[in-house]
Amino acid sequence: MTRTRKPVGRIAFVGAGPGDPGLLTRRAYDALVDADQVVYDRGVPESLLDAVRAQARPDAQFTPAEGVPGDVAKVLISAARSGQNAVHLVAGDPFGHDSVVKEVQAVARTAAHFEVVPGVGQAEGVATYAGVPLPGVRTAADVEDVTTLDFDALAAAVGRGSLALAVDAGDLAAVRDGLLAAGIDGTTGVGVTGDGTGDTQYTTTSTVDSFVAAALGFTGRVVLTVGEGVGQRDKLSWWENRPLYGWKVLVPRTKEQAGAMSARLRAYGAIPCEVPTIAVEPPRTPAQMERAVKGLVDGRYAWVIFTSVNAVRAVWEKFAEHGLDARHFGGVKIACIGEATADAVRAFGIQPELVPAGEQSSEGLLAEFSPHDEILDPVGRVLLPRADIATETLAAGLTERGWEVDDVTAYRTVRAAPPPAEIRDAIKSGGFDAVLFTSSSTVRNLVGIAGKPHARTVVAVIGPKTAETATEFGLRVDVQPPHASVPDLVEALAAYAVELREKLAAMPAKQRRGSKVQGPTALRFR
């Protein structure tokens, strides 16, 4: 009789870095998505944990680390012996914590397979995000117990270069007293950063004498930077100086489409809040789409025109049902109303023949679409798969140009369920700094399910039709990009925020306080 060997799990001590999920190393990411059990420290931000959970195994267990190092080590060893892959996720770098070093020592005394995945230290990483360089002889440490600090050595380090310490906010007074007792000059520059690398990171600059009072209200872990590098923050601060930093931006889109816009907003420093206003559903009767797909394969159409990513998805889903692929588009030309739709087509291995170079709208497409020529175009029919509520502009324009148009309902757009009460209240009370509308239906549906955005909320629209609808609903349109695309819309909002900031900076202090300009940009100058 042959015995089956019990599988052996692995243990990984993984550094989460200073908090921004984007700072996880590739090795750390691989260990986390392959884990059966993740034990995490209190210093790991919830936003990072949410990002990890989204990519982890569906059955992976996430539990907070509790007890002394020996207790955590026992949990990890037990999981590995049962064949599971276990991870201890710690803030910063694993070896920056004495308690984690003790855990690794305990695991090393067993036969368990383990690895230690480095992470960016909290002190060093947050200093960089705060725009504080650490030149010369630098000291950077993630401190668990301030009573163990050698303040004479720290004061000497500041004299030769710069210092960065990650400590609990409640220990700031003890650090100040220790530095002053060690003889450091009380006028030496100090920066204190809370929520380091997070959406609401905030840095206050002062001196050794005054930094405790300046950091009043900070909680949790903070990073203290001391020395000449603090004086360079005005020029080198980049995280907190991004155009939309701190802006709460409402993203009313379909759930499937919100992700790309939110990612671009985050890159500019905004805090996006996705509120689905539209749900996409199949047409009530599929017969039209069935005939359209058959016509595409049989050569019935000269062109197929896509006006949205949803239309592309609907056609390809129907193709998949019939076992068809991109090869069955042979001989059919494809036009797309804009670059986002064109990218969706390219993702299936097809290059569109026509994308408007100018205005990316129905009018822009018609301006570049050639009239039907019986000699050059032996097939004179166009397939237009669209939403059930699409306007007639495009179909009418094609007909005027001599084309026969099969205007087919590829999908239906229905109003989504209302968002939670706190979101509705924020929309109506000015809790959002901006709202981005990508279609007329997003305007109508947001107002229908949540109410009209407050007058101080910046309204950005993707194109002229959306602007018209917003105006009809009594909204003031502040931002409209020259080209109707999501990247251009976010870029235009960022440029508008920069313009507001410059206007406010040029105002006398009294006028700033009385300015009607709202949002984080205004608050920074008050």
Image (tube, rainbow, N blue to C red):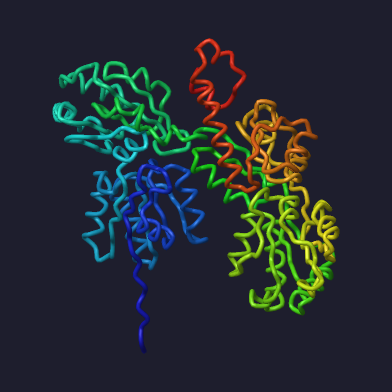
Residue 505 versus residue 278: which sits nearer the camera? 505
The image shows residue 402, relative to residue 104, as above or below, that is below
Picture coordinates of residue 175 (x, y %)?
A: 26, 25
| Image position of 2 with respect to 499: above or below | below
Residue pictured at 46% horizontal, 35% vertical: 242
The picture quadrant where one finds residue 32 is bottom left
As drawn, the residue found furthest toward the top would be 510
Q: Residue 231: image x %, image y %?
A: 29, 25
Image point (52%, 22%), residue name? 523
Tell me which residue sits at (38%, 24%) in the image.
204
Quadrant including the N terminus:
bottom left
309 left or right of 204 in image: right
Residue 260 lies, in percent from the top left, at 57, 51
Question: In the rendered view, does 202 fall on the left or right side of 132?
Answer: right
Q: Residue furthest bottom?
A: 1
Q: Residue lying furthest front in this view?
A: 375
**How many numbered marks appear?**
0
Residue drawn where x is 18% and y is 31% of the image: 161
- Among the 4 quarters of the image, the one containing residue 292: bottom right
The residue nearer to you, when weighing 165 against 361, is: 361
**How far across and down, in percent of the image, does residue 296 sit?**
75, 74
Q: Nearer the viewer, residue 489 or 514?
A: 489
